[in-house]
Image (cartoon, grey):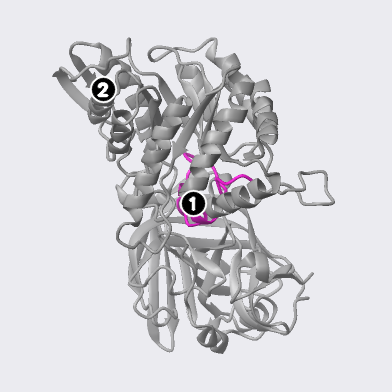
Amino acid sequence: MLAGTADLAALARRAPRLAGFDGEPLVIPGAELLQATWELGGLAPEAAFPPALFPTLPVLAVLSVRRADAGPLGPFRMAELRLSCRSGVRPRQLLVASFAEGEAARAALNERFAFGALPARVRLERFYDRVEASVERDGARVLELGGAGPLPLAAGDLQFFSSVHAADTPNGLRLVQIDGELAVARAERAEPRLARFDAAAFGLPGARLAHPVAAFVAVGDWTLPRIRFVSRADLPAFAGTERVS
Amino acid sequence: MKFGIFYELSVPRPFAPGVERAVYENALEQVRLADELGFDFVWAVEHHFLEEYSHCSAPELFLTACAMQTTRIRVGHGAVVCVPAMNHPIRIAERAAVLDILSGGRLELGTARSSTWTELAGFQIDPDTTKQTWDETIRALPRMWTEERFSWQGTSFSVPERAILPKPVQQPHPPLWVTVTSPGTELDAAERGIGCLGVAAASFKEQERRTREYHRRIQSCAPIGAVNERVATLNFLYCHEDQAEAARTGLGMLGAFGQANAHLLFTREAYPTRAYGSLANLAPAPARREGSPGDPSGIPEGMAVGDPDRIVRAIKEWESIGVDGVNFLLNAMESIPQEKVLASLRLFAREVMPAFRGRAA
């Protein structure tokens, strides 16, 4: 079985600080999401994961761009890159990088849920026949993607998976399970489009978005509940999982 | 009650030279023994690209070898993926007919549409179309086998009038099955009058519901060929006189299967569609541990892992809910040494089979 081989010391150096596990849940009403997925190329499947996680074969690179115009954190936009994997036998997505525009929201998401989001200009724009998104960091475009020809889907046709965020926690370096939920009010499937992806800016130098899979657009209330589980990055989930609430 | 053995042909890493060959040779030795012992079926799946989990990409070749090395056991080509980009319907009919001839009329043909993104995307197949192509293919197969000349104008394939050759030995044609992974496929089987080949672990309660619905619905089916009203489930077999040893080794096999299964990327996980249901790990869920009402050994409900008495009780329960056959995985990732697998088969045939057939193998 292929287990992750990423260097834990390097992971620890990049891991954002999470001061505690008692952050209040968040509900962001009416959040809009463009999620586009590619098969990841250019790296060995196991290379990006800590030993606690197992890659799916192939690994999916899941790019999510969100826009919230209202809510407890005020208006903000954010972009994330996650990779499909397994914790034990459970499906998970490892957060590799994130960016946010909207300082109050960025700070809250980092402090309470260990997103480690870097400041950036993030755009998500809806047109009649497509959705476009981009991320600009330090004046450079690091991501331009879109979803073309959106067609309606039932909310139940979408599947969401818990994320794991590497973080420097009171328990040490841990993979924090974030059980985000989107109560989908509207969903559409689209053709994924990619104009630019700076792999190094997303923390995966050498990686390629090799084969397009799918994209969808969804609108709904985005909930980030209280953190329940964390797990060690060096042990399989059955041995390294800790309940924290 | 019929008993079969079922092969995914999983291969553990590292993929050193000779490892795949050893897996195939072990499997063939098991098949020869199963034939001698009175097992009814040997099934082999079709999977592509599923590292470790299944290196069984050309099951018709493996099954031809099985047929050539046995005299009695029926060979289950199950399941062939009925999507033209992977297997053109004419090629399915031709290969199946040849296998039926070479085996002396011992072929059972399982059909499927593949459930992983890994496989579908590998052949550039649109997940939204596979149910339709499966349906079209299985409706064409009996006609290709029974009509002197065949023509078809369809959505996923068309063919001008041609003689599809050779014809199978069995009359009117080999029995047809469909693999059942997601709930609801048993109804697809019933409506078309074909057998229900379970390939994912299901609880007694869930299987009873599916079996009842299947038998009810098939009474009013519109058969696509000769009706094959049978329900088979998938199970794991490790039989040993000592229950503790059986549990230890058998649970190791289940764990190995579950781990290999964990790498699979099911279609719905990658691609938003209503054409595929959400699938979890295909391994059976562990039983509850000590202090709970479940089996303290940790052996999942209904699994044929244990001493002969325990396995007889488990299979009696499957029988009581209307299951006609049980197909066993004998090993996973070669976690059980070959000699122990063979001993398990022998003990099963000696101590368990007679409880269902009244004869020693």
Determine whether the residue tagged by mark 1 lies in a helix, strand or loop: loop
The amino acid pointed to by label 2 is: Ala
Q: Is residue A103 visible?
A: yes
Q: CA distance from mark 1 to mark 2?
A: 35 Å
Quarter of the rendering containing residue A69: bottom right
Give percent across and percent down for residue A81. Answer: 48, 71
Mark 1 vs 2: CB contact within 8 A: no
In the rendered view, does B144 fall on the left or right side of A56? Answer: left
Mark 1 or 2, closer to the camera = 1
Read off the chain for label 1.
Answer: B
Q: In the shown orientation, is residue A28 left or right of residue A192?
A: right
| Label 2: which secondary element | helix
Give me the chain letter of mark 2. Answer: B
Residue B97, disc: 2
Residue visible at 65% across and 83% down?
A107
Res A70 seen here: no
- How crowded pointer 1 is (Cα within 10 Å; few <14, some 14-19, many 20+) is rated as few
A89 in relation to A113, above or below: above
- Provide residue A204's location: percent of width, then percent of height: 41, 78
x, y percent for residue A177: 65, 68
